[in-house]
Image (tube, rainbow, N blue to C red):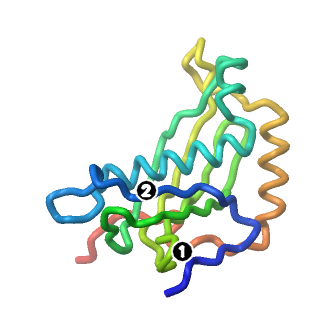
């Protein structure tokens, strides 16, 4: 299988490798480390829209994850190269909803997905607060670029069992 080719409208650029210490007793990447790798991709995404370390320090503001959903599609072994793509699903003045896709960088298969809802927080009050206009403008630009993209399969997924 070839390396994945992503739509250029998706946020791309985050890559990393499955570390040996992330391997569990089943011989594959442990679920906790999928979340860690997605967290690294989240930092890449938020840095790109202006919620980077300099902003967080200067504005005394940050963002908190308030909901997330992870799906595991195919197992990953130690040393596997990973590449991520991110799609913005929606936002308002205080919240951002986005969807990460984790692929094996050489074989191309989709290994996992992560849908996240964040809230912007004033760190002094420790309460939600509106994002600055500069970040909202970046989100509007990204939303416009990604508008033609279909909603990713699995977005808005609910866990359940059929009876």
Circle 1 crowding by C-alpha within 10 Å: few under 14, some 14–19, many from 20: few
Horizontal and vertical percent for residue 70?
41, 59
Give the numbered dot on residue 135.
none
Crowding near the residue tagged with mark 2, few <14, some 14–19, many ≥20 C-alpha atoms within 10 Å = some
Q: Quadrant of residue 19?
A: bottom left
Judged from this view, the residue extending furthest toward the bottom is: 1
Q: Secondary structure at mark 2?
A: strand
Residue 12 vs 136, above or below: the answer is: below
At x 48%, y 52%, the residue is 38
Tell which of 125 and 60 is nearer to you.
60
Q: Residue at x 48, y 58 (%)?
A: 114
Left or right, residue 3 beside residue 159: right
Residue closer to the observer: 121 or 29: 29
Name the side, left or right, on which 26 lies relative to 98.
left
Please provide percent x and percent y for residue 109: 47, 78
Label 2 to label 1, Cα distance in Å? 13 Å
The residue carrying mark 1 is 153
- The label shown at residue 69 is 2
Task: Give SS at disc 1.
Answer: loop
Q: Is residue 67 or residue 108 the one in the foreground?
A: 108
In the image, taking residue 43 as reference, residue 159 lies left or right, namely: left
Taking the view exactly as shown, the residue that stands out farthest to the left is 25
Dot 2 or dot 1, earlier in sequence: 2
Q: Position of residue 92 (x, y in %)?
A: 72, 43
Is residue 110 shown left or right of residue 47? left
Residue 147 x/y as whole percent: 78, 67
At 59% from the left and 33% from the top, the residue drawn is 63
Which image quadrant: the C terminus?
bottom left
Vertical order, 147 against 121 (above or below):
below
């Amino acid at each position: 299988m070839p390396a994945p080719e992503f739509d250029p409208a998706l946020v791309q650029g985050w890559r990393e490798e499955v570390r040996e210490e992330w391997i569990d007793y089943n011989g594959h990447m442990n679920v906790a480390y999928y979340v860690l790798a997605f967290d690294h991709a989240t930092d890449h995404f938020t840095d790109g829209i202006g919620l980077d370390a300099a902003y967080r320090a200067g504005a005394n503001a940050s963002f908190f994850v308030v909901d997330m959903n992870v799906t595991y599609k195919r197992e990953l072994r130690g040393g596997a190269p990973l590449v991520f793509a991110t799609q913005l699903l929606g936002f308002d003045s205080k919240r951002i909803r986005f969807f990460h896709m984790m692929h094996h960088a050489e074989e191309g298969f989709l290994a996992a997905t992560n849908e996240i809802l964040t809230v912007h927080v004033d760190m002094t009050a420790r309460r939600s607060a509106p994002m600055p206009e500069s970040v909202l403008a970046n989100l509007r630009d990204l939303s416009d670029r990604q508008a033609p993209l279909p909603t990713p399969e699995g977005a808005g997924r609910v866990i359940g069992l059929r009876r």
